[in-house]
Image (tube, rainbow, N blue to C red):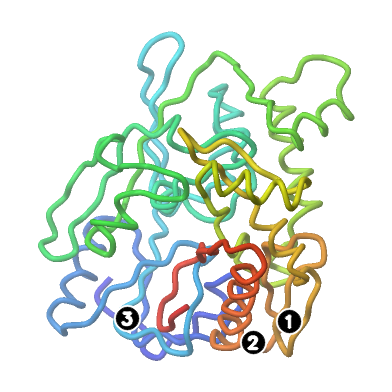
Amino acid sequence: MSTYSADYSLRRHNTLALPARAEFYGEIENLDQLEAARRFAQERRLPLTVLGEGSNVVLGDRVAGLVVRLVNDDLAVEPLDGQRVRLTVGAGHNWHRLVEQSLQLGWFGLENLALIPGTAGAAPIQNIGAYGVELERFLHGVHAVEVATGERVRFTAAECQLGYRDSVFKGRCRDRFIIHAVELELSAVAAPVVDYPALREDLDRHLSREPEPRDVFEAVCRIRRDKLPDPAGTPNAGSFFKNPIVSADAARRLLRRYPDLATFPAGEDRVKLAAAWLIDRAGWKGVVRGEVGIHDRQALVLFNRGQARAGELLALARDIAASVREHFGVALEMEPRCYGCRF
């Protein structure tokens, strides 16, 4: 790629369908094109922004610089022994399609992560997780390019510093590297993780035998489709806020006031609170304000009614966070990243 589109609409490249425009835009299929894009931005002193499928971002009216989408979706399979395999996946590979492919190939572990929107390259940045499983269990390494120098770097799983919805790529290495491939290690031995309450309930309702990985995959798809709106019909970015983590003492104080508060262990002397419960109890679930609203079945989902801009959406998000803090003394942190705007 040697040319880029100027003043390019990003509406169809973000799941909130916000009417953002990129100063320049291009799509990247391989490392040579990635290097050309890096040089284009560097020579013109432009910021370089990478979009996956736009499922975890809020885009302002104008995103300055060069915006690129990695569309490399290659998949390489390397057997390690009779029971394990290493997959090297292009950053542009659709995540849900990867989960389906791994099951078809007889490699297990990712089934709880079905229907999570986005690409494989975005998965380690967020340390995606759902229904009792996080990517951290399977990540072996990440291949990246340093934006400043073009140097190709491999991060080990430990060097990625994965945490709850967190990684080194959201901290010390934020905006310093572009991920172009991800290594995952999966097993041929089925070991379904089914202890998450909603998942267990669904499986018990639909099965009269012990679940297999395909059963878990189908159950997760059922739950997500019932619980979360499809961005194609209701533009949204999925969960807009992280589940806050507080001290065990703070959680006990809240539970004395609100015995039905949903909580989960989060390490020594730490407790994770259900952000959806907090938002719902603060009175926001189902609220519609102008062109934006909070979904009536899932309080974590903020949506665009069709003509919203980033400013209107973020104003609603700020009011929700202020209300939760006022009611419960708990701070909510926004999950999507902002480009061309601020929370």
Q: Determine crowd level at label 1: few under 14, some 14-19, many 20+ residues with C-alpha closer than 10 A.
A: some
Q: Are marks 2 and 3 in contact (CB under 8 Å)?
A: no
Real-space Cα separation, disc 3 to disc 1, in angstroms: 31 Å
Which one is in front in this view, the residue at disc 3 or the one at disc 1?
1
Q: Quadrant of residue 176?
A: bottom left
Q: Please tell me whether residue 282 is drawn above or below residue 41 in the rendered image.
A: above
Depth order, front residue of 259/167: 259
What amino acid is at disc 1? Arg
Q: Are marks 3 and 1 in contact (CB under 8 Å)?
A: no
Circle 1 sits on which residue?
305
Q: Quadrant of residue 287?
A: bottom right
Percent across and percent down for residue 140 are 34, 32
Secondary structure type for disc 1: loop
Q: Is residue 1 left or right of residue 276?
A: left
Circle 3 sits on which residue?
4
Q: Which mark is residue 308?
A: 2
Q: Please tell me whether residue 203 is drawn above or below residue 150 in the rendered image.
A: above
Secondary structure type for disc 2: loop
Q: Is residue 254 left or right of residue 200?
A: left
Counting residues from the start of the chain, the first of labels 3 and 1 encountered is 3
- Which quarter of the figure is the N terminus placed in? bottom left
Which residue does the image show at 60% across and 49% down from the upper left?
116
What amino acid is at disc 2? Ala
Q: Please tell me whether residue 38 is drawn above or below residue 25 in the rendered image.
A: above
Which residue does the image show at 24% across and 58% down from the upper left?
177
Q: Determine crowd level at label 3: few under 14, some 14-19, many 20+ residues with C-alpha closer than 10 A.
A: some
